[in-house]
Image: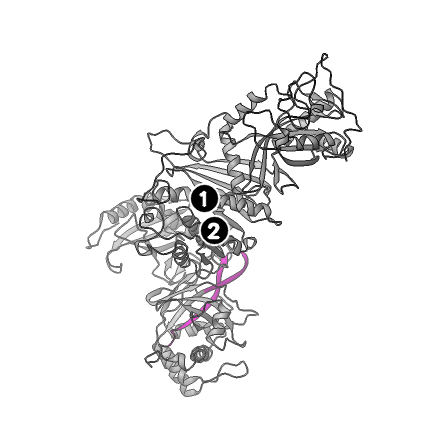
Amino acid sequence: MSDRTTTAVTAGQQLALDQLRQITGSARGGVFLAHVDTAPAKAPTGFVEARISVGCAGLSRAEGGLRLRSEEPVTLYIPPDFPFEVPLVYTRHSRFAGAPHVVWAHFPCLYRSTATEWDPADGMYGFITRLLDWFRAAAAGELDAPGEPLHPPHAVGDYADGLLVVRRDAPAAEDDEPWLGAALLHRISDERSDVVGWLPFGQPWPPTLADARAAAQLPNGAEVFLAPAVITADHLTFEYPDTARALITALARGRITARMVLGLVGVAADHNRRLRTAAEQTGPDGTPHPLAPVHLLLGTPSRGTSGHGPRRTHLVAWHLPDFADKLTRRAVTAYVDRQLPELGDEIMQIGEEWLDTLTTRWIRLYEARPEVTVRRDHHTPAAWLHGKRILVLGAGALGAPAADICARAGAAHLTVVDQSLVHPGIPARQPYADADIGYPKADVLAARLNQIAPHATRIEPVVADITRGLPALDVHSFDLILDCTANRVVRAFLERARRTDPTHWPHLATVMIGHQATRGIAALSPHGATGGGADVLRRTALTARTDPTGALADMVEDFFPTEPRTELFQPEPGCSDATFTGSAADVTALAGQLMTGILHALNTPADQHTMAALTVRTPSGPTDPQPAGPRWLTWPNDTIITDDATGYDVRIAPAALAEMRAEARRGARVRGPRVETGGMLLGAIDDSTGIIYVDEATGPPPDSLLAETYFQHGLDGVPRHLAARRTATGNTSRFLGLWHTHPHSPAQPSATDRTAMELLTLPLDDAPARALVLIAGGPQPVWQKWLATGDGPDLYARLAARTTAATTPPATTVPPGRPRSALWWPGGYATRPTTDNPLPAPRRSDDARP
């Protein structure tokens, strides 16, 4: 190899030349480099030219493969930034013109994406290997191997000629005939227009701007115009010509003549003028509106995957100078009978002369058509949001990034509800600017999000208090509700609204972050779940507190402290709302993790009747204790019955119902199938939501009296158990009432039960004024099936209130030896009778059940 260059060689270029010298003559599976030569003559400015020969005699050629000579001369143009920039390959001949992945007849294309396929560390060794692979594939006819994406024709765009974004799937030629018509364009700015529809020639085109906007589903005021479009039936070439005459010649091979192109351009330009009324054709000062830009869209079947189905249309756009509009003003007045207008010989001569002098100026064109583009977030959890309707409650630290995620994922409709205004301090961590101060968050956020995907997503702000504004919204029209308020009042309101609605609500996700923005919780209630956000968060607190591993102790301290938090952060003086401390990085990271978790769950819903909560933590420093990773907690649906007296829902946790069944089965084995049993219920009553939570059921204490006609609950160990459960659950779950069974009988209160409910007193120091009475029963088939398979029994629930007359039981019901001032349980006596103090069993006639 001789070095004859006089151009200064960079260190990178020298590295490439040194590596080429080492490669020269080495074998590569029968393909070798014959020699390397450098010459300064024709290399682009700054590039170094290196000529090599590739030995191809040993390559086997398949039908359809390129015919290669025994040695193929190739020129490499080595850029000054090598190895961080890839060399170009140039053939001095044009024998490869028209072959796949050969650009401008002389440039074999080795890489589809240099960003992912080019490794600078491989240098010229990797580059030459890639070149040799290209020659092998060319000889074998596998440059477009089956299953690989096709490489469409090249058309170098010019920034000065504007930008076109194609948003609607393109038409295709049929029956070997070209498709002629117009593209409906939405003018975004002086530089950019979007293709928002296609109008075939021969069918009526929108006669007015209002009709054109309606056809493209654009708002009033949107500027629209037409651009002529031609779709060929045949693939044209691997690159488009750079002169208008050469382009028309190429189109002629597809039965598209210059007369057809000029006529179509004229028809589109004429229709653009007629879309505007006389008043719309001039501005307020009387000056004419500028004419719509004249573009010609050209399509050819070049998109798709090799060997897989029909090819889709590949589009380019040709910008026509003002002379084209001047020409069509003279050439066209109208067209008749679905035929392009006849152009006179004089006009055709002017058009032909124009074509001979015109160069093709290709507009930059970006594809956003669903048929040829794949969203960058496809196969991710966020793909669930595409096309959905989402309701976001709150536009603050969590609501704003959550709404942003929904908009970028392609949600069809997004409603944001918040009554707050932008305050000076919140831009530190919320996506608002100084200019937004004093404006409603919902309005500001909606205006910004509407700019993300105006053709795909509509953002609607609602500036209102959520508890007042929500009833005006049709919540059932949404696919997902995101409660990002961290507001107890809102959670309770949603829980009650969801409970009292006769139809299933959409999925509900309630998200919160801790007081220092280091932890987050997402409570998910799928549309078939029995509990909403308040319910799921209550379960989360119970599970976290009772977890024997203590893995969630930090979550308890952050979100569910036993004592109310006394250290509150108020960023502004006066009576500003207490909030958390945290940066934009903190809240954005937590919002992203929580949203990803929610969307994971919605993408793979194993059971729509399962409630779940996700706990996440932000990373710590490299020397700090590493926090635990994300963790899901899940719960099956409760069994729900209604207390007819109050209308409250009684939600019985599966664990509580399972304990009742276990005790009923044990009693049937030990005491007989008709002996009643029972125990205590632990849980809570929430009057704001109208829900009674039954978390736990116990069996009978050892001093209880059990018979076929009644159940009397004992006292042994009861205070200790209740105290232990209050401590373990942070007073979340406490004494709620009593349950007992009516084996093989209706789940209805007997006369004894009714008397006990009327005379309700409780043997507790902190006895509540009300207690739940729960009866499990059913006819023999129902009862036996519950004991055998776990299918639910018949249930009766009543929230009984203590009466003033119940402080001292009637003398007739006081067991001998018990003081009249003793406290009593509903449903039976407090102590088991002894042999010295026998208690006669109630008669069945006195204890008749309905």
Quarter of the picture holding the C terminus: top right
Under mark 1, the amino acid is: Asn
Seen from the viewer's position, the closer of residues 679 and 560 is: 679
Q: Which of the labelled discs sits on residue 487, or is there none? A: 1
In this view, 762 is above or below 152: above
- The span picked out in magenta is 291-314
Q: Secondary structure at mark 2?
A: helix
In this view, 766 is above or below 352: above
Q: Secondary structure at mark 1?
A: loop
Seen from the viewer's position, the closer of residues 374 and 51 is: 374
Under mark 2, the amino acid is: Ile
837 left or right of 610 in image: right
Q: Position of residue 55 (x, y in %)?
A: 38, 51
8 left or right of 824 in image: left
Q: Position of residue 553 (x, y in %)?
A: 45, 29
Q: Position of residue 584 (x, y in %)?
A: 35, 45
Estimate how packed mark 2 is, as few (under 14), some (14 to 19) or many (20 or more) residues with alpha carbons within 10 Å. Answer: many
Q: Mark 1–mark 2 contact, CB under 8 Å?
A: yes
What main secondary structure does the magenta stretch of the protein show? strand
Q: Which of the labelled discs sits on residue 466, or is there none? A: 2
Estimate how packed mark 1 is, as few (under 14), some (14 to 19) or many (20 or more) residues with alpha carbons within 10 Å. Answer: few
| Residue at the extreme right of the image, as rendered | 845
Is residue 23 visible in this depiction of the protein? no
The alpha-carbon separation of the residues under discs 1 and 2 comes to: 10 Å
* Picture quadrant of residue 766: top right
| Residue at the extreme top of the image, as rendered | 836
Q: Is residue 604 magenta?
A: no
In this view, 448 is above or below 720: below
